[in-house]
Image (cartoon, rainbow, N blue to C red):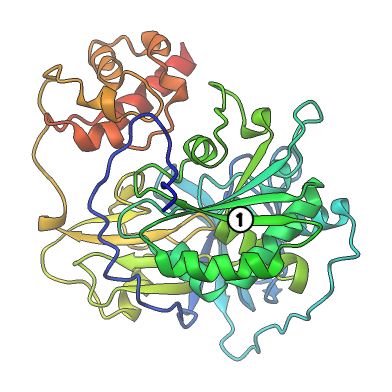
Amino acid sequence: MTSLLTFPIGGVHPPERKTQTQGLAVEVMPVPDELEIFLGQHIGAPCTPTVAKRDAVVEGAVIGEVKKGLGVPLHAPVAGKIKNLAMSAHPIRVTSPSITIEVDKEAEPVQYQWVDWHNMSGPELLGKIHDAGIVGIGGAGFPTHVKLSPPANSPVDTLVLNGAECEPYITADHRQMLENSAEIVEGAKIILKVLNISKCHIGIENNKPDAIREMSQAAQDASGANCTIKIEPLQVKYPQGSEKQLIQAVTGRKVPAMALPSAVGVVVQNVATAKAIYDAVVYGKPLYEKIVTIAGKGIARPANLQVKIGTKISDIVNYLGGLQPGLSKVIMGGPMMGFAISNLDVPVTKTTSAVLFLTEDEIDTRPHSQCIRCGWCLDACPMGLEPKEIGIYVEAKRAEDTAQFGVFDCFECGSCAYVCPAKRPLVQFVRMAKMKAKRA
C-alpha cells in the first residue's frame, strides 16, 4: 500500500468526533422569515449597499458592491423586501454593517439554466466567478477571482483542491464530495482553464474512504488529454487542510515564509469553492447558499444543512428542535480555529463551515497556568515556531518584540494550545502579539 501523504513538521490528532454527522445527507433548511446579511463577507473592503430600505429584491440580485479595493459583489439569497440597513453583532469584528431582508414566502425559486462553458475564454470564466461573489469558502474568504489571477512573475503549474476537512466535528465538505463529486471535479476543470494549466491534485484525509472512492471515480471520468486530476489520500493529522501544509504534503514544495502559494507554482482552492465555481459558471448562480455542519451534544438534532447566507443561528436551532441541557459553549467554525459566540442571533456567512453546540463534557474549562517549559508546543507547531516564547513576551508586555519568534508566520491553527498541559491560551497570545506588533 502506498504510504499516506502528510506534512513533515508538527501537527496533532485531536478526537475526530465526526460520527454524529458524517452519515447524514445534506438537507435543505426552509427559509426563515428574514435574513441578516453582513456587507463584509470577504477579506478586503466591505460592500456598499446598492439597495435602500423598503426596496423589493429578487433572488440572486446584487445588493452590495465593492466600489474600491479588494472584494466581490453580494447577492440577495431570496426574493423579498429590504427591511433594514444597520449594524449587526459580528462574531469576530464585534459589529458589522448589514442588510436585513424580509422574505417573500410566495415567491417562486429562481430556475437557473445550464450553459456549456467549454468555449468560454479564461478571462470570461474569471469574470463569471467574480460576478457570482465567490470567495474561499473553506478559509478566510479571500476573493476567488484574485486568487485565480496569480502574479505574472509567479507562473503556476499545479492546482490543489483541499478536501482534507481536518477539523473535528465538521463533515460539510465530506458530504459535498459524496453527493456532488462530479460537480466538484467539473469546477476543478474550470479552474484549470482559468489558470491555463492541466494538473490538479485533490487531497482528502484517509478517514473519508467513501469520499476518496467517489471522487476517484469522478476524477477518472474527467481526466483526459487536456487535464489530469488525481486524488491524493492524506494521513489523518491536523492541520492537514492548511494551505502551506497541504501543498507540502501533496507536491513536496515548501512555500517560503510570508510568501503566497503561487511562489512555488501552486494555487489552492477548497472543494466546496470548486462546487460554487461550477454553479456560477455552468448555471450562472451566485454564491448565496452554504452547507454547514451543525453538531455537538448541545443541539437536539445534528445535521448537515444547506442554508441561505444570512440565516441566523437561532433559526437553525429552532429548526433542529432546540438546545439540550448542559450546553456550555457555541462555536462558529471548528473547535480548533472557530470562534465562540454568546449571541444566537448571529447570521451564517459565506465562510461559515460549522456551528458547534458543545456541552461541558466536550470542552476543557480548566484555568490556564504559567508556562512549564515542556516544549510540547514547539513539537506540535506545523510552522516550526516558538509559541511559548510569544506567550511569555505578551505577558511581559513586549508583544512588539515577537516577530523574532515568527509570530507573523503563525496561521493560528491552535495545535500549540491543544497540547499545552498548562492550558495556556497561546492562540489568543499570538493574536494579541500580531495586533500590537502592527501598531508598534
Q: Position of residue 115 (x, y in %)?
A: 83, 75
Q: Is residue 53 visible?
A: no
Q: Picture quarter containing residue 372?
A: top left
Asked whether, in this view, residue 314 is left or right of residue 391, the answer is right
Above or below for 392 versus 219: above
**Which residue is outermost to the front?**
1
Asked whether, in this view, residue 260 is left or right of residue 329, the answer is right
Q: Where does label 1 land, which residue?
A: 230
Secondary structure of the residue carrying tag 1 is strand
Q: Position of residue 132 (x, y in %)?
A: 72, 61
Which residue lies at the image location 55% right of the left edge and 66% below the top edge?
A: 215
Above or below for 174 versus 440: below
Which residue lies at the image location 49% right of the left edge and 69% below the top edge?
A: 213
Q: Is residue 414 visible?
A: yes
Three-letter amino acid code of the residue under disc 1: Lys
Asked whether, in this view, residue 148 is left or right of residue 152, the answer is left
Which residue lies at the image location 63% right of the left edge and 64% below the top edge?
A: 219
Q: Nearer the viewer, residue 92 or 230?
A: 230
Q: Position of residue 304 (x, y in %)?
A: 40, 72
Q: Nearer the viewer, residue 161 or 354?
A: 161
Q: Position of residue 49 (x, y in %)?
A: 68, 55
